[in-house]
Image (tube, rainbow, N blue to C red):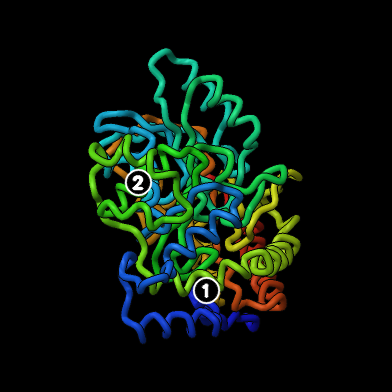
């Protein structure tokens, strides 16, 4: 075992100098709060919202404290009430069902396919029921976009409002339409391991003026909504301002200052991620026992992580691969473990919600292996990582370690 990777799977690139300078300027003048601005000054948060709305082709945008806050705000803004049922992916991360539970609603899970996208047949079947949920919180988990044209046909026909969780798809597109612009609301994360980095933070976009007004009121506008620029006209707020609670969570000026220069570079960063993804994908393809996730032609994705399947492997075999790769410096995560580890929880880990048996989904989840692809990796690093994974998967597979029951 001479080939050992020495890189760090959690080390991000430095914050750009322009963002550092902007943050220092905010700290020097001390006006960090979202509404603490000088005469004639818009403020970094307002400018971020205005610029992000333009970038996403949306009339309205709101910058908030986290991606999870954006999700919960979207749910409240579209009218979800305590006790309501909300559809969401069985394959997602904990903040997605967590946001549903946080507003007193109940997650209802939709299955996952071997392409790691929402099972549209399962969705259509659930929506064929007379008492089906009226909202779908669609998670583009790990950057995999389902057929968004077909999904919207199904949901529109059933009168279902779609909220898109775009934590892993900022900058992605389906058939040329940006992720987050198919549904009623698009929600994004600015947490360190996402596509722009403010440590923590979130963004929300919509074309619906009343949803936008409710979201702004929810975020703690203190009746200062006229200061928002990526916002509806004041008369829209008159309809909602006395019946919408203040749940403070709009982003501060410091984090907004850090994000604005990064968003300007998003397209270039997407290209860099995808170059690394494609090198890893090419190195893993045709490995015995390993299934590469083929990406559909209409999908322009962001390869900030990569997944592959060890489909129908034994748990012992998968764990052997993970141990062997870790010994050679390659950090892999497994969504099939019976107990949640770090972010690799699954629908039956969240025991605050009903989790009926989902055998088809369980089979897929049991085989999902996940790996971060930070931009601190070079293309040569990606080649080395792929060689290591290929070698260890092949060794375990050829020794019979993949067989169920072994």
Can residue 405 be seen here?
no
Residue at the front extreme?
39
Q: How crowded is mark 1: few (under 14 residues within 10 Å), some or many (20 or more)?
A: some
Residue at the top extreme?
130
Front-most of residues 314 and 337? 337
Q: Position of residue 251 (x, y in %)?
A: 36, 63
Q: Distance between the residues labelled 2 and 1?
A: 31 Å
Q: How crowded is mark 2: few (under 14 residues within 10 Å), some or many (20 or more)?
A: many
| Left or right, residue 236 beside residue 105 | right
Q: In this view, does 390 lie above or below 15?
A: above
Q: In this view, does 256 lie above or below 14?
A: above
Q: Where is residue 79 in the image (x, y as percent from the top left)?
A: 34, 33
Front-most of residues 163 and 325? 163
Residue at x 60% of width, y 81% of height: 4
Q: Is mark 1 on a helix, strand or loop?
A: loop
Q: Position of residue 405 (x, y in %)?
A: 49, 45
Depth check, mark 2 against mark 1: the one in front is 2
Q: Residue 225 carries which label?
A: none
Q: Is mark 2 on a helix, strand or loop?
A: helix
Whether tag 2 and tag 1 are in contact, CB under 8 A, the answer is: no
Front-most of residues 222 and 202? 222
Residue at x 31% of width, y 55% of height: 224
Can residue 290 be seen here?
yes
Q: In this view, does 399 lie above or below 296?
A: below
Front-most of residues 203 and 393? 203
| Left or right, residue 372 beside residue 190 | right
Residue under numbered circle 1: 9
Q: Where is residue 41 in the image (x, y as percent from the top left)?
A: 42, 71
Residue at x 35% of width, y 41% of height: 237
Residue under numbered circle 2: 73
């Amino acid at each position: 075992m001479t080939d050992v990777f020495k890189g760090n799977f959690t080390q991000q690139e430095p914050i750009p100098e322009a963002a550092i300078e902007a943050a220092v300027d905010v700290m020097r003048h001390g006006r960090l709060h979202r509404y603490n601005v000088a005469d004639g000054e818009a403020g970094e948060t307002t400018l971020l919202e205005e610029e992000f709305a333009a970038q996403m082709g949306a009339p309205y945008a709101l910058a908030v404290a986290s991606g999870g806050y954006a999700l919960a705000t979207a749910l409240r803004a579209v009218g979800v009430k305590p006790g309501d049922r909300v559809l969401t992916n069985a394959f997602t991360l904990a903040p997605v069902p967590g946001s549903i539970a946080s507003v007193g609603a109940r997650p209802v899970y939709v299955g996952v396919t071997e392409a790691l996208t929402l099972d549209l047949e399962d969705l259509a079947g659930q929506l064929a029921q007379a008492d089906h949920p009226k909202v779908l919180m669609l998670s583009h988990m790990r950057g995999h976009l389902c057929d968004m044209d077909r999904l919207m046909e199904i949901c529109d026909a059933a009168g279902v409002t779609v909220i898109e969780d775009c934590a892993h798809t900022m900058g992605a597109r389906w058939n040329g339409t940006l992720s987050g612009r198919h549904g009623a609301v698009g929600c994004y994360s600015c947490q360190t391991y996402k596509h722009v980095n403010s440590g923590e933070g979130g963004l929300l976009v919509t074309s619906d003026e009343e949803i936008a007004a409710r979201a702004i009121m929810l975020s703690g506008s203190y009746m200062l909504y006229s200061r928002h620029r990526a916002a509806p006209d004041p008369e829209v707020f008159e309809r909602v301002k006395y019946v919408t609670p203040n749940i403070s969570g709009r982003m501060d000026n410091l984090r907004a200052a850090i994000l604005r220069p990064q968003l300007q570079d998003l397209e270039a960063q997407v290209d860099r991620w995808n170059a690394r993804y494609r090198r890893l994908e090419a190195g893993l393809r045709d490995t015995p026992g390993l299934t590469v996730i083929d990406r559909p032609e209409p999908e322009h994705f962001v390869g900030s992580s990569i997944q592959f399947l060890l489909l129908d492997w034994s748990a012992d075999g998968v764990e052997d691969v993970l141990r062997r790769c870790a010994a050679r410096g390659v950090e892999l995560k497994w969504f099939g473990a019976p107990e949640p580890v770090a972010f690799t929880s699954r629908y039956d880990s969240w025991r605050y919600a009903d989790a009926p048996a989902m055998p088809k989904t369980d089979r897929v989840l049991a085989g999902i292996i996940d790996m971060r692809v930070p931009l601190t990796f070079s293309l040569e690093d990606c080649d080395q990582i792929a060689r290591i994974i290929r070698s260890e998967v092949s060794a375990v597979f050829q020794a019979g370690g993949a067989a169920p029951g072994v």
